Amino acid sequence: MNKTHKLVTYSLLIALVCVGTMFIKIHVPATNGYVNIGDAFIIISSLMFGPVAGMIAGGIGSAMADLLSGYAHFAVFTLIVKGIEGYIIGWLFVKFGGTKLVGMYSSLAGVAFMVLGYFMVETVMYSSYKVALQSIAFNGVQALASFIIGYPVFSYISKNVKLKFNV
């Protein structure tokens, strides 16, 4: 794939993650954060286009959503956590054969990392693991909802759409 095609593909994936993150937001009072379905698009991006695309789309798209939504204090942490989440999903999927079962476990591993990553960030940010513990339930709901949406969408697309390129 040429550089222009790759740039356009990554840009579209970033936009999808950003919009998916901003589209449905449920406020979380304990951490002043929000629950969203952006991780569904990270799952789709990572499984369809690989670990680097998942990392770029997840990290930049989610951080952009934080910046545009007034959560700038989380943007750098989001860039790191969501970028690693996308990379984990894509890497595990490629490394272990790309089967349906591997895709499911890869997705679950990635969103589990997101929950753990935000727990660590919030423990440091709020100097309290008690506050961070409250967010585990919300991040867990976000992870589960994103998995329930993202993996079936990926499965449908991969079965019914022929991709003519590989990023």
Image (cartoon, rainbow, N blue to C red):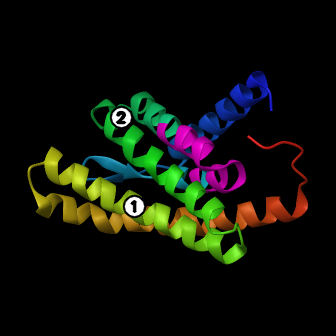
Magenta-colored segment: predominant secondary structure: helix
Which residue lies at the image location 32% right of the left edge and 55% below the top edge?
Answer: 117
Above-or-below relation of 138 to 23:
below
Which structural element holds mark 1? helix
Q: Nearer the viewer, mark 1 or mark 2?
A: 1
Q: Earlier in the sequence, mark 1 or mark 2?
A: 2
Between 97 and 40, the one lying in front of the other is 97
Mark 1 sits on what residue?
A: 113
Alpha-carbon neighbours of circle 2 within 10 Å: few (<14), some, or many (≥20)?
many
Above-or-below relation of 1 to 157:
above
| Image coordinates for residue 22, horizontal then vertical, percent | 51, 41
Q: Is residue 33 left or right of residue 103?
A: left
Above-or-below relation of 65 to 144:
above
Give the extent of the magenta segment.
42-59
Which structural element holds mark 2? helix
Q: Which part of the image, by quadrant, shows the N terminus?
A: top right
Q: How far apart are marks 1 and 2 (CA)?
A: 17 Å
| Image coordinates for residue 118, horizontal then vertical, percent | 30, 54
Mark 2 sits on what residue?
A: 75
Furthest residue toward top: 4
Residue type (three-letter) at the residue carrying disc 1: Phe
Q: Quadrant of residue 103?
A: bottom right
Q: Which part of the image, by quadrant, shows the C terminus?
A: top right
Which residue lies at the image location 47% right of the left edge and 53% below the top edge?
Answer: 85
Q: In this view, does 82 lie to the left or right of 127?
A: right
